[in-house]
Structures are given as C-alpha cells and as structure tokens.
Image: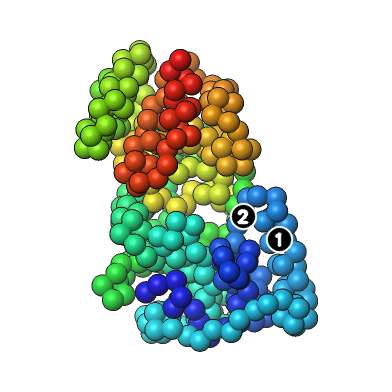
C-alpha cells in the first residue's frame, strides 16, 4: 500500500495544501468533519489558526464550505475493503501523512460518525522498524497498565499494521505536575550509576557499531563525571506535547515508535523541554542548552543533557539525518 490508495468513498479536504498535504480529511457532513479534524493537530500558530477556521467552516457551514473550498472525491481502495471485511463495518477514512513519509495514520469512522480507532501503516523499512518497536512498547506498557492495549495487530499483503483505540481528550501542554506524575509511572525499581547504566552502555555499543569513536570517547568521558545513581525507566523516546493527550482520567502518552525498554531517568523530561525550545520557540543551540538545564532542575543537569545530545546524535546518524544542531549544542556544553 502507498499514500495514494488509502481512501474510502468520500469527499476530502487536503490541509494545509493539496499539493503538500499533512492530512486528507473527510468532510461529507458536519458530524464526519468534526471527527476527522481530530487527526490534524498542528502546533504552529499559523497552522492552528488554519485548523480552527476550516473546522468551523465544515462543521457549522458544511454545504456552503464544500462549494467554496477545493475538495476531491475519492473512490474506495482495496485496503479499506479489506478492513471493512475484517471489522464488519462500513468505513469512512481520513488520512495523516507522516512528515518523514515512513507511515500513514488512518482514522476509521462509521458513516454515522462513530470513531472505531486509528491505524498505523508503515510505508518504508524505517516505518516498519518503528511500528514493530511501538508494538513492543504497547505489549510491555499495557501489561503494566500504563497504556491501553492495541485493538489489532494484523497484516495486509504481508505488511503488519496496528489498529489503536481512540483516546478522548485534548492534545496540548499538560502542567508540570501531570508530566512528573506520568514519568513516575515509567520508572522501574532498579537504579545504576551512569558508569554501569544499561542505557549508557547501549549508547556506547551503538557508537562502536556506527564506528564513531570520537562520540564513543565523549560518552565515556561524560559518564565518568557523574557520582549519582539513576533509575532504569521505560523511555518513551519522543516525549513531547504533541504526543500526550490530556484526558478526564489524566495525561496519556502515545506514539511509542522510539521506545527504549531499558531507558535512563530524565531523558524523556529533557526531550520534552528540548522539543518545545527547538521546534516551538526556535531557540539557538546555546540558548536552548540553558533553557533545558533550567527546566529539569537536577544537580547533574549538564551531564544528563550532554548524554541526551549524544543519544540524539546517534539516533540521527543511524537514520542518516542531519545532527549539526545537536553537535553544536554538545560542543557548547563541552567548552
């Protein structure tokens, strides 16, 4: 399956533009439109304004809006027919296109606007690797009652995919107590010095595998600076406001594609503030370093941030992505 054959027999609005869409949303009627916009959760001010305006247009003035906006009617593709047979329901499908083009996320509704769930379908080897890792995370975390179990793990044309249930709530910025309480649920019983912590040893092994001896030596040097023990945790790996839902029962994390079973305490908290500072506030490397250190409020904040940046560099190296920003930040801290 590819990004062009995942539609149901419905009328679609492509946002932010038809040429370069982030989502394809079903807008047949007001109820379906209201649900489909749940799939579009931008964080920039411009994109949030676009969502607010178009959602109001298609929920409050649906018939008129379909005449004023450029929309496209699609036919039902074979994967959707397969899912209809598998679930015993007629489906209305909206689509999220991942920025990296490694996966699709499909929102499944019934024609009477009942949301069944969300499918994650990989489009590349990287997408498949991340999906398998997310399944592992959900298997572990659901057994600990930290998250809900997925609804379905299935294959289509020999490619696996996940069907996840809907979590009702709002994606956004939870308060600091909610963040702390959530991360506390990820904590395990064991604690280690950084010299012996499994997460740091994994990073060193990864540096050896990628043949980056300079970074390996840097990690070794940094961890010897520490005199503190840190808990082993279930590390989310991409802990950020857009991967957390505020519900009536508390904060719920999702998107566990970068999950690490033997994670290091504070890496997720650093990631949370790092993503806000870098992606939402547009901070420079030196400004961001100081911002994160001020936010995490621990004695060895500098050491932990340096190790976090080394981890980020290794991830980007493995995925052949640019890590210049992280390297500049690490160099600033190493001065």
Query: Who's the residue at 31% across and 75% down the image?
Result: 156
- Counting every numbered tag in the picture gives 2
Crowdedness near tag 1: few (<14), some (14–19) or many (≥20) residues, C-alpha within 10 Å: some
Q: Which colour scheme is used?
A: rainbow
Where, by quadrant of the figure, is residue 62 drawn? bottom right
Whole-percent x and y of residue 61?
Answer: 78, 76
Q: Mark 1 points at which residue?
A: 50
Query: Who's the residue at 72% across and 73% down the image?
Result: 59
| Pick the front one: 100 or 174 | 100
Query: Who's the residue at 31% across and 67% down the image?
Result: 160
Q: In this view, does 119 lie to the left or right of 179?
A: left
| Pick the front one: 209 or 34 | 209
Q: Is residue 192 visible?
A: no
Label 2, secondary structure: give it: loop
Whole-percent x and y of residue 125?
Answer: 30, 59
Tell me the quadrant of the picture where the N terminus can be found: bottom left
Query: Who's the residue at 37% across and 30% down the image?
Result: 310
Label 1, secondary structure: give it: helix
- Tag 1 near tag 2, CB within 8 Å: yes
Q: Is residue 82 visible?
A: yes
**Vertical side of 45 occupied by 74: above or below:** below
Q: Mark 2 points at which residue?
A: 42
Where, by quadrant of the figure, is residue 234 drawn? top left
Whole-percent x and y of residue 202?
Answer: 26, 34
* Mark sitting earlier along the chain (1/2): 2
Tell me the quadrant of the picture where the C terminus can be found: top left
How far apart, in angstroms, are the residues tagged by discs 1 and 2? 9 Å
Q: Is residue 249 left or right of residue 191?
A: right
Crowdedness near tag 2: few (<14), some (14–19) or many (≥20) residues, C-alpha within 10 Å: some
Mark identifier at residue 253: none
């Amino acid at each position: 399956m590819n990004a062009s054959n995942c539609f149901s027999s419905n009328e679609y609005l492509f946002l932010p533009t038809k040429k370069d869409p982030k989502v394809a949303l079903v807008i047949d009627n007001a109820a379906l439109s209201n649900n489909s916009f749940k799939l579009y959760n931008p964080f920039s001010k411009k994109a949030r304004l676009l969502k607010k305006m178009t959602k109001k247009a298609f929920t409050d003035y649906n018939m008129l809006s379909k005449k004023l906006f450029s929309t496209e009617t699609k036919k039902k593709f074979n994967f959707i027919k397969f899912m209809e047979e598998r679930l015993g329901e007629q489906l209305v499908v909206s689509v999220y296109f991942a920025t990296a083009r490694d996966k699709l996320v499909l929102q499944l509704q019934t024609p009477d606007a009942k949301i069944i769930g969300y499918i994650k379908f990989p489009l590349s080897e990287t997408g498949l690797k991340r999906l398998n890792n997310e399944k592992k995370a959900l298997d572990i975390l659901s057994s600990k009652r930290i998250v809900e179990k997925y609804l379905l793990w299935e294959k289509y044309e020999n490619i696996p995919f996940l069907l996840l249930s809907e979590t009702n709530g709002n994606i956004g910025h939870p308060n600091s107590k909610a963040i702390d309480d959530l991360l506390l649920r990820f904590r395990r019983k064991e604690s280690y010095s950084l010299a012996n912590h499994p997460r740091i040893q994994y990073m060193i092994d990864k540096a050896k595998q990628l043949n980056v001896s300079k970074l390996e030596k840097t990690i070794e040097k940094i961890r010897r600076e520490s005199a503190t023990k840190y808990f082993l945790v279930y590390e989310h790996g991409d802990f950020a406001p857009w991967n957390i839902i505020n519900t009536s029962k508390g904060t719920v994390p999702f998107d566990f594609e970068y999950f690490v079973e033997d994670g290091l305490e504070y890496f997720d908290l650093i990631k949370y503030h790092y993503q806000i500072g870098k992606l939402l506030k547009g901070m420079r490397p030196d400004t961001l370093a100081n911002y994160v250190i001020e936010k995490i409020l621990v004695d060895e904040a500098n050491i932990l941030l340096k190790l976090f940046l080394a981890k980020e560099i290794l991830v980007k190296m493995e995925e052949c992505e640019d890590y210049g920003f992280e390297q500049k930040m690490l160099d600033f801290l190493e001065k």
